[in-house]
Image (spheres, rainbow, N blue to C red):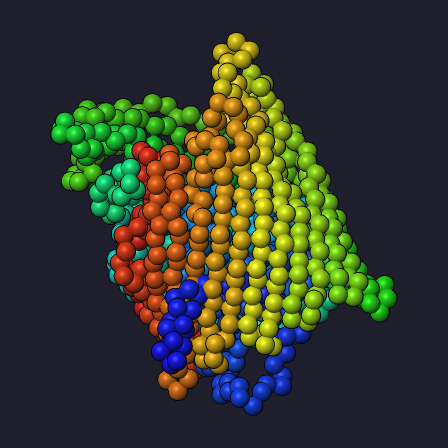
Amino acid sequence: MRTSYLIGAAALAALSAPAAAQDTTLEDAQDTSTPSASTPQPRDEGAIIVTGRAQKLYRADEVSVGKLDAPPLESSLVITTITEQLIEDQGARDAQDLYRNISGVSFFSYAGVTARGFRQEEIFYDGLRGDPYAGFSVPQLFNVQRVEFLKGPSGMLYGPGAPGGLFNYVTKKADPSELSGELTVVAGTEDRWGGSAEVNVPLGSAFGARGGVFYEDRGTFRNNAASRTLIADGGVSFDPGPVRVDLQATRYDQELDANRLRGVPVDDNGQFLTSRRWNHNEPSDFLNLESDVVQLRLEAEPLSGLTFDATARYNNATEVQNYHEPRGLFDSDGDGTIDATIREFRDQMRTQETWSFGANAVWDTDISATIGNRVLFGLDHFTSDQFFQGRSLRGATVDTPGLPNPLSLFDPQYGLSDPTTYDQGPFTITETDTEQTGFYLLNELTIGRLILTGGIRRDKAEADGVSESETTYRAGLVYRITDDVSAFGQYATSFEPQSAGSQNPLAGGPFAPTTGDIFEGGVKTALMNGRVQSSLSAYQIRRTNILQADPRGDVGGDGVDDLVSLGEITSKGIEFDIAADVTPNWVVTVAYGYNDTKITEDNGGGGFSNAVGDRFANAPEHQLGFWTRYQFPELGLAAALGGDYVSERVSISGQPVNAYMVFDASLIYDFGPFRALLRVDNLFDKTYAASGFIDRTGHFPGAPRSAFVELGYRF
């Protein structure tokens, strides 16, 4: 019997996943003011010991991405929240370190993910558009308090976007109430070193200031590649009571050597043709980002029951790249084995200047003793001026003066190809101006245990003179079966304007937006006084009106091949999340996602890389993440084990992307003001592809085993 228990416990730990980050708490179930006699109490608030690990470590007390704040058991939205504590425990540095913590989400490329079967790249900061990481840079986490992922179409809440979901990064802000600070240093494999410093200072009874700086220098496992990241972040807050004002400014400076990084070529079985460390870039190649952000936020409660917030965000970013792009694999010596690639040199610069504004007013009133109502009226406005300057020069299969040299897959010789000797042509310049405005109304009616939500939004989006308008909707229902169990359902829609470059009238444009909708239902629980939290949901998402090449070619005989706004991709899935305090010292979290995303309609002549009935590219059928942590109170230590399983997929080119399972581990010392973290990623050094792209650039390789130590002091 004991053996069976241990095996079951070990299996549960091996399956545990980031549902700890799943926001599935109950407002009444959080009250631990009357603990049972069998529940040990914390001996020191600053120590590693706390009661209710799942609740206090990895649960967010508030979530802003849903517009109307509500306990999860009272919301029809499905939101996963990754807390600051989980980010710390996992030693996460950038967004790619977090994807395994969200059921139904897996890596696609750079900052993009596959979410519920669809490629998703929408990133918001504090509820607003204005991602400071232009182009191909990945968001860093130093100045981020928590990360929220809203699943499914969110057009009614946020306007244009893909139907899989969106990320909202909530930034750190000054606290006028306390003096605090933190110093950290880090060192690890691949020549990794760096550190950070943060301080928060109260300035009188209502003012506070916060400042922080982060710097990290690290190599990567790919040949020639390395990064240097500097983030300087500061802000002031004024919080006298019914009004709060936050002003923030952030500087991002990132230098990436031998980037932009593509994948490693694979064979028809999905196996890498060469080492996962292979890099198509020269040592002189680079990707450099400079980005400045200023943000002002106002929160107020002018009347009892009436709250108001308004946020304005400005971002100015420049990303410069020089890199060698793989352009075609070939057999260089005629022995029948693919062993080299043609390369194309690209010299590019992207700039973006964005302004974003959003405001919300919420009126909360009780109609009677059993009926309550909340109504939200909001608007947002976003403008973006983007500039692109680029030129490219393709090489040949043999060394040719003035052209990029080909590169061997098995014996790459770097430094023989010098971009300063290339016979490059003039730059191509593209400027794109976009503007988007949305107005929305959302109402929530509570009748006893029944909660009904309905919303409507009207958007107008304009890009380079092409204007589109769209209306999106949301309806939700929650029934509180008991205080610990809720059933929920929702219907929501989304839209994505077609790109300005594809609206050419000669090609048949302008075209209606791509649209999406979702039907979803499930059950949320917070059992045993919130110590066992879970969410089970089933959904169907359709994405329609997808722009494709017309199989008839140039229909009008005007010299331009036509496009057609046809096609449908359908995603069906089930997601299950659970976070549990197995014992007062052991928390186990599990998040599992099943997804079936297939092409259900095309243009009659193909249109997609795959055919009707095929699984959509990079959409795994099964995804499982886990995180489990056990603490040793007497020692001030905690040991954690986590990991990620992603089932087989296909790349955009139809090549298989094989299933993988990787494990990570952390050892944490946290007592009083001191904290130490030993982190090991890819514990068993598995070779795997994190995702697939196209055949000439290959699959993105997962990183081999790495480790680092982080030491910190807090006051």
- Please say if 694 is above or below 596: above
Residue 522 in the figure: left or right of residue 647: right
**Which quarter of the image is occupied by the N terminus?**
bottom left
Q: Position of residue 346 (x, y in %)?
A: 34, 32
- Please say if 632 is above or below 679: below
Please give the count of numbered marks on the rendered protein: 0
Residue closest to the eye, 351 or 146: 146
Residue positioned 47% across, 80% down in the render: 583
- Please say if 705 is above or below 456: below
Residue closest to the eye, 347 or 115: 115
Residue closest to the eye, 260 or 641: 641
Residue closest to the eye, 675 or 79: 79
Residue positioned 62% across, 45% down in the render: 518
Hey, which residue is sitting farthest top in the picture?
557
Residue positioned 53% across, 88% down in the render: 38
Q: Is residue 38 visible?
A: yes
Q: Position of residue 228 (x, y in %)?
A: 34, 53
Residue 684 in the figure: left or right of residue 548: left
- The answer to which quarter of the image holds residue 76 is bottom right
- The answer to which quarter of the image holds residue 677 is bottom left
Q: Position of residue 574 (x, y in %)?
A: 53, 53
Q: Position of residue 434 (x, y in %)?
A: 59, 35
Residue positioned 18% across, 25% down in the render: 398
Hey, which residue is sitting farthest right in the picture?
368
